[in-house]
Structures are given as C-alpha cells and as structure tokens.
Amino acid sequence: MKAIILAAGEGSRLGKICEGLPKCLIKIEDNTLLEIQINTLHACGIDDISVVRGYAGESISIPGLNYYDNPDYAGTNMLYSLFCARREMATDVLILYADILYEEQVVRRIIESSHDIAVGVMVNWKEAIQQRNKVALEELEMVYFDSENRIEEIGKKRTEEYETQGQFMGIIKCSRRGVESLKSNYDRLTEFYSGKPFGQAQALEKAWLTDLFQEMTELGVPLHCVIIERGWMEIDTPEDYERALTDTQFVRRLVRVKTDWSKRARLYNELDWVSRDELLSTIVETTDVQKGKKVLDVGTGTGKVLMALQIQCPEADYYGMDISQDMLAKIDARHGFKLSVGEMENLDGFDDNDFDLVTARMVFHHAKNLEQAMREVYRVLKPGGKFVVCEGNPPDRHCIKFYKDMFHFKEERITFFLDDLVNLLARHGFQKITSRTVILRNMSMNNWLDKSGLPFRNVDIIRKMHYACDAHVQEAYNMKIQDDDILMDWKFSIVSGIK
C-alpha cells in the first residue's frame, strides 16, 4: 500500500508557531509532524510515501520520499492537492492530512478495512470541540452515517445533532477499485465545474476532499466509516499545538527516539570505529598517563578508552562517568574502574583540582551546555593536569550541510572542526594546546548504522542520503560502493591542553 500526505497548506491559523515553515515541519519533542507521521506509517508497513508540497515546499526535503508540488497552493485546496499526486493513484493508497497525528492502531484499523473507500471518523467529537474552544462547529468536517456505517452525508454543512454522527479525521483508505472511483468522479467534475462553485467551495479548485465524497455519496457510490474512539490529534491552532506539547502521554507513544541508548549499549562494542586501534592508540599517546596518576574519562561508554589507558599504565587510578547506566553495565568489574552515572555539565561528585588527566572521546558533541561542560572539566583538573578531547569532523566545510542533515536523523549533535576544538580549549584557559588528526579508512556505513540503535526508518533515510549525496561529498569521504555497503574515510581530531 502507498501513502499520500497532503502538506501544501500554509497553516495560517498557527500564526508565529510556523515561522515561515509549512505546518508539517513544526516540531514536537524534536520531531516534525511529518517525521512522526512517516514513522507511524513505516511501523504499519507502509514505506512508499508521497508528499504533496505547496507553501515553502522546498523546505520539505526528507530523503526517501516522493514529492509532488502544488504551485497554486494559495488558490486551491485539499482535493486539488491530492490530484497533483495522481501518478501515485494506481493501487491501494492511504490518504492523510499532514497536520494530524495518528497512533499506529488507528492507521492499522483504517488500512485493514475491507471497504473500497474507508473514511476515518471519530465519534467522540464533542471532546475535541471542548479542547479546541476557538474552532466553530461549522469548521469541522462532520460525517453522518447509517447503522451499517455507510456514509449518508459528509462535509462542512450541517450542525444539527444526530446520534450517528462523527468528525472526519483526515485519513482515507482506498482500494484499487476505490481509487479508480475517485479518479473517474473527479474527472467528471473537472469537466463540468472547473472554475465554478462546487459543494461548499467557491470553485471546484477550492474544494475539500469531503466535497467530492458528498457528491459520490449522492450518486450512490458506497463510502464507509471506520469508527475511531480516540488516538489522533489535529494541530491546526495554537491551542492544539500547546495541547500536543503538554499531552506527553499521547505524543510519546508516537515520537520515535533517534538513538536508543539501551539498544546501542548492546551493540556499541561491535561498532568498528569504537575499537579501531589507530584511534585508541593515538589517544593513549596523547595522554602520557603515568603510574599513580588519577584519571577521569567523561562519557566513558563501555570503557574502551579506560581499558586502553590501563593496558598502557596499570598502576593509575581510573574513574569513568557516563549518562547511560546500560553502557556502564558493559564494563567488566575486574578492571577495577570507579564508575558513576552523570552528565558532563555536572561533575559535582568530584572535588576541585582532583584529577591529573581528563579524557572525553566522542562525547562533547552531545553536550547540552558546552561551556558549562568545559568549566567543569577545568575545575576538576589539577593545575598542570591535561585534558584530551576527541571528536569526529566533517572532512571539509563543503560537507557541513550533508553532515548536519544526516545527523539530524540520528541525534542532536554539535559539529566540530579542528579549529573549533582548539579555540574551545583556549577560551577556557588551557595552555600548550596540541592536536592530532586521525583518518579511519574504509569505515562501513552498514556497520555504523546497524549498530547505532536507530529506528529502521531513520537508518533508511541516512543510508539513502549517502547514496544520493553530491560528487564533492562522495570524494571528500572517499566513498566506495561495495556490494550493498558504502566504505568511506572518517576524520577525527584529538586536541589536548594543560591547565
């Protein structure tokens, strides 16, 4: 089954919340409405997804989707936008409004309907009216149906109360035969009503989907309801958006985390870059750890840096701290490391001037407050103590957009170049700053993605971004396609400074 998401509207009722973006790109818990919808569709087995763009359409650019544009979005409406994606209407299709969030169970109920045209209808519509006090009843698309759930009337027209009525939820499933019925009826209407009033609209081009459905119902075409009690949320007004931000119980059932750290902990030691000797050995060489010294590894993960240091100097005193207890649990207690759970911005468990060496490999890009994290590192170091930080870099500045766009689907991440790290240490009072660059050759894209604890949809997007990137990015990363994998070169900067 395919899906068509209608995302051409401006979202004017949301006002400043959109800030010049299409409504589908506003964020809830760092996920756009469109990303949340895509993840839900993917969970239901639908990965052939098309989006009809309009207002600020160029800003909708998630890889792996099909895009169709409605250049006359300001003068048209949902029905016109749907048929901008007519090429996708040749088989079973699910049609969705882009400003509505659906739980997985709701989508599954719709697509499992045996009817040729199945329309999602919420019967608890009065609850929605109470929660959206600025939306008049006349603005809702209401559905009136019989005892067999066959639609009798649909659209923005009647406000009388009937026992068998509900609110249209902006989701429709059409079988192949249902799609053909939609197309033939739309073609007939365009022949007679193009530029003329139709249904509740001033012109056919401004009609809603429900105007077409009402016409089909009057002609005897069977349309059926799928009755839904709850499990959806429309984001059409500032009040809706505020409710979405505060109704975390609903939203968190829909939002897919990017990096799942509990899952990543199980796979972390299988990541190729984590155990590469050339990176670990260069860090060890930079530290020059000595007998009797006290060492803290910030963001220690599964303890790879501590283990490498301990091999070099078994007689030092080693401490590790990480935000993930699942990661720390992977460290064998026989190493004797003193481990604690905590954030790099808060090292209150350690005294001032406490350590001879602090290391931080591939963790500072996660900092919620980079300046505070640096102040804490400086505080716990002894005068004359050394700080060693290691971070991955884009291969050059041309690749920044690719790098940031890619990591958007993995985690919130600070992007560092070598000079950013050097300046960071200098700004916080470190002296005798030195740097080393390490290139890890022939890194496997599949190893990195498959072991990173990401939802499959995010993995799929990042993989497609690698195959679709421009020639300069491919050259800068020295990308080589090998079977179904891409091998590439990754760049790391190791910077050290003395307090």
Image: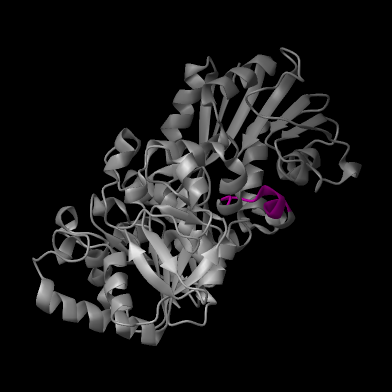
Q: Where is residue 120 in the image (x, y as percent from the top left)?
A: 47, 66
Q: What stretch is highlighted in magenta?
A: 256-265
Question: How many marks overall?
Answer: 0
Looking at the image, residue 380 sits to the left or right of residue 155; the answer is: right
Residue 453 or residue 311, whichever sits in front: 453
In the picture as drawn, the residue positioned furthest to the bottom comes out as 177
Looking at the image, residue 71 sits to the left or right of residue 328; the answer is: left
Snapshot colouring:
one colour
Instruction: Say if 366 sits above or below 200 in the image.
Output: above
Task: Work out which quarter of the rendered image holds the N terminus and state it.
Answer: bottom left
In the picture as drawn, the residue positioned furthest to the right comes out as 334
In the rendered image, residue 194 lying in the magenta stretch gets the answer: no
In the rendered image, residue 261 lying in the magenta stretch gets the answer: yes
Instruction: Say if 286 sits above or below 282 in the image.
Output: above
Residue 186 or residue 441, whichever sits in front: 186
Q: Can residue 100 be seen in this view?
A: yes
Q: Is residue 50 visible?
A: no
Q: Position of residue 166 (x, y in %)?
A: 46, 60
Q: Where is residue 212 in the image (x, y as percent from the top left)?
A: 27, 71
